[in-house]
Image (spheres, rainbow, N blue to C red):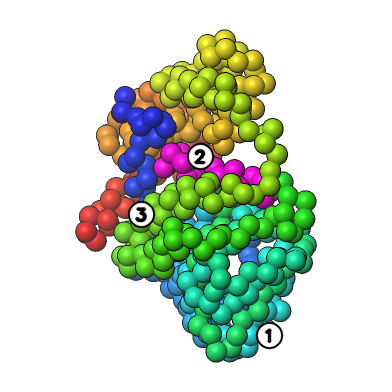
């Protein structure tokens, strides 16, 4: 068994970088998770011009009828997309009109980090100036009062990070950073204002915004650094959002935290053959409801989901580090039948174990050549 960190995550997992062979495969991967935006439909930027260097990102030029500039897109984690936009508007009014229809109905968290002044967002009664805030986080699952305006003489520079709930879980499983309570509070907001949080212009948040604007240019190094910076940003958001109104009764009671941490440790040690919910409840002294609801609230995943993730991650390690048969790997991960293991692996990663092994060897070769 490979050694695991206290979070139950092998650090090597963070090194799995996706390399795409063509633009369409990258686009289809994005669209499986995130819907096509109004900016694409209105051709504010046409179809991507090219893949970035080693196939880790997409490169697009803006349509000159709207703006002059470029946009880069990345997928640092499954369920997380990242965009760096640098542009100077040629038709600010047209850009603002498109934007008013771009945000509503997204249904995922959008986090903007500002690298320059010149753009003002409106979320209901909340006005956010990119020259006065480090950024803004929003969640708009339905039509709301949203828009932005920009000056034609301004050079706009910002980073956008989009988070599905599954993306937050990915960050936790790979980096050991639990989902941010702020994101859940925004999802539970009833109005546009309650679903918006302005990032204060503190030195720490300004520093991390600067770091996103100055990532390494190399594709592999860029993605790896971006992942770590996303983790750092989520940690900072936990501190910066303390003033956000919320229902304190939703927090896990202190007396239960230790028992839930013990439950996670037990699952980590026995992930190939985890105890049932009833057994785990008896082992840690919590009833079924407190165990399952507390675990989800504290760690951002279900007991079963966490156990499955550990098995899948261990399978990834074995596929990358050895030449054992798929049957042997299935048994080591708690599956009696290789077919059940293959099905679970494909559902989780979108590829079969044998294909994953082959792809990893190709990716490892690309990374070695780049370094």
Q: Residue at x 44, y 49 (%)?
A: 231
Q: Main secondary structure of the magenta part?
A: helix
In the image, is residue 121 above or below residue 151? above
Measure the C-alpha gap from mark 2 to mark 3: 19 Å
- Residue 49 percent across, percent down from the top left: 46, 76
Q: Quadrant of residue 251?
A: top right
Measure the C-alpha gap from mark 1 to mark 3: 37 Å
Looking at the rendering, the stretch of residues picked out in magenta corresponds to 169-186
Q: Nearer the viewer, mark 1 or mark 3?
A: 1
Closer to the chain start, of discs 2 and 3, is 2
- Residue 299 percent across, percent down from the top left: 54, 34
- Residue 271 percent across, percent down from the top left: 45, 23
Q: On the image, numbered disc 1 is attached to which residue? A: 93
Measure the C-alpha gap from mark 1 to mark 2: 40 Å
Crowd band around label 1 with a 10 angstrom C-alpha radius: few (<14), some (14–19), many (20+): some
Tags 1 and 3 touching, CB below 8 Å:
no
**The N terminus lies in which quarter of the figure?**
top left
Looking at the image, how many numbered discs can be counted on the residues? Answer: 3
Q: Which mark is residue 224?
A: 3
**Tag 2's secondary structure?**
loop
Q: On the image, numbered disc 2 is attached to which residue? A: 178
Name the foreground residue: 307 vs 369: 307
| Residue 24 visible, this angle | no
Q: Residue at x 67, y 74 (%)?
A: 148
């Amino acid at each position: 068994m490979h050694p695991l960190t206290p979070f139950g995550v092998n650090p090597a997992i963070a090194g799995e970088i996706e390399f795409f062979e063509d633009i369409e495969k990258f686009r289809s991967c994005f669209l499986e998770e995130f819907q096509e935006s109004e900016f694409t439909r209105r051709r504010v930027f046409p179809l991507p011009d090219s893949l970035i260097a080693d196939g880790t990102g997409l490169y697009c030029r803006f349509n000159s009828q709207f703006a002059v500039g470029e946009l880069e897109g990345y997928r640092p984690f499954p369920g997380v997309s990242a965009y760096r936009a640098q542009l100077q508007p040629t038709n600010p009014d047209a850009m603002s009109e498109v934007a008013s229809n771009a945000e509503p109905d997204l249904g995922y968290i959008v986090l903007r980090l500002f690298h320059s002044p010149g753009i003002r967002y409106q979320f209901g009664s909340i006005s956010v100036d990119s020259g006065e805030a480090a950024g803004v986080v929003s969640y708009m699952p339905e039509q709301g009062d949203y828009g932005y305006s920009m000056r034609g003489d301004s050079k706009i520079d910002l980073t956008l990070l989009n988070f599905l709930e599954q993306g937050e879980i990915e960050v936790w499983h790979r980096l050991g950073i639990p989902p941010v309570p702020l994101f859940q509070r925004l999802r539970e907001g009833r109005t546009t204002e309650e679903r918006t949080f302005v990032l204060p212009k503190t030195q720490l948040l300004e520093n991390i915004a600067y770091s996103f604007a100055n990532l390494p240019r190399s594709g592999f190094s860029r993605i790896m650094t971006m992942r770590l910076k996303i983790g750092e940003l989520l940690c900072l958001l936990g501190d910066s959002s303390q003033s956000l109104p919320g229902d304190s009764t939703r927090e896990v009671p202190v007396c239960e935290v230790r028992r839930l941490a013990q439950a996670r440790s037990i699952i980590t040690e026995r992930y190939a053959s985890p105890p049932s919910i009833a057994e785990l409840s008896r082992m840690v002294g919590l009833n079924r409801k407190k165990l399952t609801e507390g675990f989800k609230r504290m760690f951002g995943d279900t007991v079963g989901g966490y156990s499955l993730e550990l098995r899948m991650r261990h399978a990834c390690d074995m596929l990358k580090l050895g030449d054992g048969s798929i049957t042997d790997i299935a048994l080591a991960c708690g599956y009696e039948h290789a077919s059940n293991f293959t099905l679970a692996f494909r559902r989780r990663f979108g590829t079969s174990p044998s294909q994953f092994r082959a792809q990893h060897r190709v990716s490892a070769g690309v990374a070695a050549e780049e370094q």
